[in-house]
Amino acid sequence: MSFYVTTPIYYVNAAPHLGHAYTTIAADVMARHHRQRQEEVFFLTGTDEHGEPVADAAHALGIEPQELADRNAERFKALAPQITASNDFFIRTTDPQHEAIVQEVLARVRDNGFVYEGTYEGWYCPRCADFKAENDIDEGNRCPIHHIELTREQEENYFFRLSSFQERLERLYAEREDFVAPRTRYNEALSFIRSGLRDVPLTRHKLAWGVRVPWDHEHVFYVWFDALLNYYTALSYANASEDLTERFWPASYHLIGKDILRFHAVYWPALLMAAELELPEHIFVHGYLLMQGEKMSKSLGNVLDPFAVIERFGADALRFYLLREVPFGQDGSVSTASFELRYETELANELGNLASRTIAMLVRYRDGVVPVSEVDPQLATDFAGLPARIAALVDRAELTTALEEIWQRVRRLNRYVEEQAPWRLAKADGRAEDLDRVLSTLAEGLRAVTVLLWPYLPTSAERLLGALGAPDISLAGAELGAGSVGRVSAIDSLFPKDEQAASA
Ligand code: MSP
């Protein structure tokens, strides 16, 4: 089995922000989960460096586009390890290998009869790098996304015959209802297709910053075609000793934000059909993180800055918060105040306390050695089949629901501690066996949920599994009773309360 997941490649006209971190974190959770299933995984992210948005931003700074691209690509590259993203490669669309394959694939699209010369006349948004249809324009000829005035462009272009894929795309959507998810996005893409596809410019004449069109050096490819192809080109050169295309193409999942739906759900499959390449299995569209109506938080100020959060609370806390607070696939508000609330109530009080109590009781009552005993049947029922259920949810990119399922078990284990009151058993005569059973059930339950949490909280999960002496993170081992904890060792608090904030 192989699993290939991608993020959009990020524009280098600006610095990385929370929205970029969001998609990369989600893709990382999926990649890690599939590695837990012992699958071969390839996880790609990178930067989109050509086109007008980048050229314009560079000119505004009085530098060459390449210089801006080099500068900002470094910042995006640095973001990945900061959020503990385990990407296998970082593609830059100025990589010469990428450019060469873009030229090759698009020349094939032309040889196959899907390219012709024409004149484009219409509205264009330089910030979107997108040509706007008449029905997609706000009052006063403004961009509906950026609200800036659109430019009227007239340009000799090569066109891509998108219109000739009308029927094939309709058939694709009819045959593969899971091609785009969530359903609202599937419907949105399908209704765009049904409204009638028009041909789109494949090249730009007036712009020099892009991949040269091999059959006409006065043109560069329109940035979106160059960019979309990254998902395909990366596989051929990511690994110097092996072309990975055979192993990983087509992609299992493209994760994208809702603003770039049309390019991925309509242009991209059409382009792949024109180039005779296989289509991706799934496109999953997440919503926006909304940051309005901010309430001041005690320690983070009022902007949820990913770097400030990571510095203060660690990457795990940010990863957890984003996927827990905003149902993956929908829009949702994030704020520093709700971040701190979840950190304290869920990470510190629920998971953190469960871990520290369990370890402390094992140390106090059994010298750190987990007694050999059956797992308590009441808990066994509550955990039965959990890894398979999580796998089914992650297969549909339902990352928030999967996390909720796991979290229910964290809460269940805390309830179990309260119900069984091991401190009472420890004092009572003739209850040693019961205490053995409770402590061993707790240790095993904690181990199992921690394995399931690993994709979301990799650093804390590894620390905790280390303290439990049970480093195996395979999903098969997440079944209650499938593993064993031998000797536990004490660790510092996993999610320390923010002292400074508390005293502020
Ligand atoms: N370069 C193109 C993508 C090309 S993919 C072949 C692009 N880049 S981007 O940097 O502008 O945006 C990349 C992704 O970040 C988009 O999917 C976008 O939705 C996401 N986010 C940017 N801001 C966001 C939020 N506030 N919330 C969630 N994600 C958003 O588009």
Image: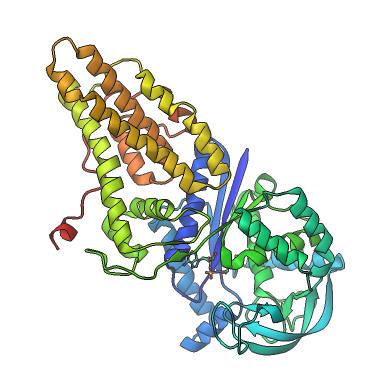
Residue furthest top in the image: 430
Residue 212 drawn at (x, y percent): 70, 76
The answer to whether one can see residue 503 in this image is yes
Q: Is residue 439 above or below residue 335?
A: above
Q: Residue at x 69, y 69 (%)?
A: 225
Q: Quadrant of the N terminus?
A: top right
Foreground residue among 38 and 478:
478
Pick the quarter of the image with the C terminus: bottom left
Q: Is residue 504 above or below residue 342?
A: below
Vertical position of residue 137 compared to residue 493: above or below: below
Residue plotted at (87% across, 68% down): 113
Q: How is the image coloured?
A: rainbow
Name which quarter of the figure residue 473 lies in: top left
- What residue is at 31 percent from the left and 35 percent from the top? 466
Q: Provide residue 245's location: percent of width, then percent of height.
A: 68, 50
> Residue 370: in sight, yes or no?
no
Q: Position of residue 118 (x, y in %)?
A: 82, 82
Q: Which corner quadrant of the image does residue 2 belong to?
A: top right
- Looking at the picture, does residue 357 appear above or below residue 44? above
- Residue at x 79% of width, y 76% of height: 159
Q: Position of residue 234 (x, y in %)?
A: 62, 58
- Judge left or right: residue 317 versus residue 390: left
